[in-house]
Amino acid sequence: MPAARERGIRPASALSTAVSAASALASTPAAYGGAMTNRLADTLSPYLRAHADNPVDWWPWSAEAFAEAGRREVPLMISIGYSTCHWCHVMARESFSDPATAAQINEGFVAVKIDREEHPEVDAAFMASASAFTQNLGWPLTVFLTPQGGTFYAGTYWPPQARGGTPAFRDVLTAVREAWTARRAEVLASADAVAEALRAAAHAPESALPDATALRAAAASIIEREDREFGGFGGAPKFPMATALRFLQHPLAGGSDAVDRALMAMSASELRDAVDGGFFRYATQRDWTVPHYERMLTDNAQLLEVALDAGRQDAVQGIVGFLLGVLRREGGGSARRRTRSRGSTANAARAAITARTRLPARGWSRPPWTARCSPAGTGS
């Protein structure tokens, strides 16, 4: 999960439009019935079909799911992921395949499973609203909604047992259900506040472009975070941060030396795939060891530009070999990502997610009831 590319805030209308448009995407009633465990077996998405045997009574993204939530007067639990998302599969194995957890979900919620690659506009809208509750955004993304489509709580991966300050998923379900049942007015107020913050962000006036002084100051703040021992920026988990590296290469930024040190460290580390070339998405350790097994087209394409400008021919050749030899498909297209199992990588520490877009501070405060979803009110 990222040093991710920035994602712009989608206005609240994007979410309501997506909810309305779901009616056109709904399957026929026959797809919802029959003896199958849930409603995902006949969907087009391989990611959704992989959850068809879960004991969770999943619905696909559809107007019918919202209607069912309204009929039962319960919240919706939206779970968003994609086929090559490691922690999506971990949460599916730990929680969505567990009969006790599934029973709790089925009793208190209408559960909706979404493939973000099938509905990127829906994912973007929920990602924007989820930023009100956590700065660590990524997948699996779990969002709790009112039957009218208002987001009132959200998070990413929750483990089956509490650990490291992260509450257990079943405790989160219990807290959300209790809030919906006993403090409905607070929950609805939270949903309204998120929607209002998104509307305000959508209509915020554009700021002026930064001048040379501002660009140099931004570059200096990035360089201050350089890891002089292992190269790159920040601690574990450590990301290549291709966009930041490219920015530092600009003559106004004056950070080419830091970029060269980062590329040298990355190229000599486990982050670089010694078999296919190219770079893994991130390393779980500060010294670039134990990389996450996913290799992304976008990451490597951006790092190719950085390596070219830096004159790092070894990195250039590795990336080109990966892009042309592994990701290229017949007909001229390219796959978006490739995964590789790398032993201990499958059991690496939970991926941290660089914050994407956060809601503006004005007029918004974290709803008080959400503290009950985390130990000692520490937040998610």
Image (cartoon, helix red, strand yellow):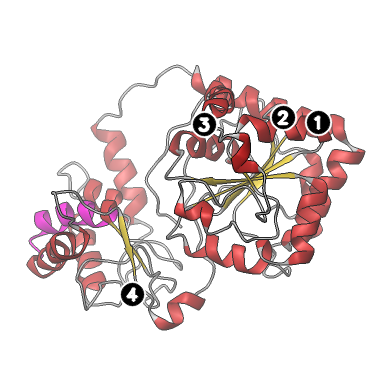
Q: Which mark is residue 98?
A: none
- Name the secondary structure under disc 1: helix
Kindly identify which residue carries mark 1: 71
Residue 107: x and y in percent read 82, 50
Q: Is residue 303 magenta?
A: yes
> Which label lies toward us, 3 or 4?
3
Q: CA distance from mark 1 to mark 4?
A: 59 Å
- Which amino acid type is shown beneath numbered disc 1? Arg
Q: Where is mark 3, residue-wise?
A: 25
Give residue 67's mark.
2
Residue 269 among those drawn in magenta: no
| Residue 193 position (above or below residue 100) | above
**Mark 3 or 4, nearer chain start:** 3
- The residue singled out by tag 4 in the image is 229
Q: Which residue occupies 30% across, 77% down?
A: 270
Q: Residue at x 13, y 60 (%)?
A: 324
The answer to whether residue 58 is visible is yes
**Kind of residue at badge 4:** Glu
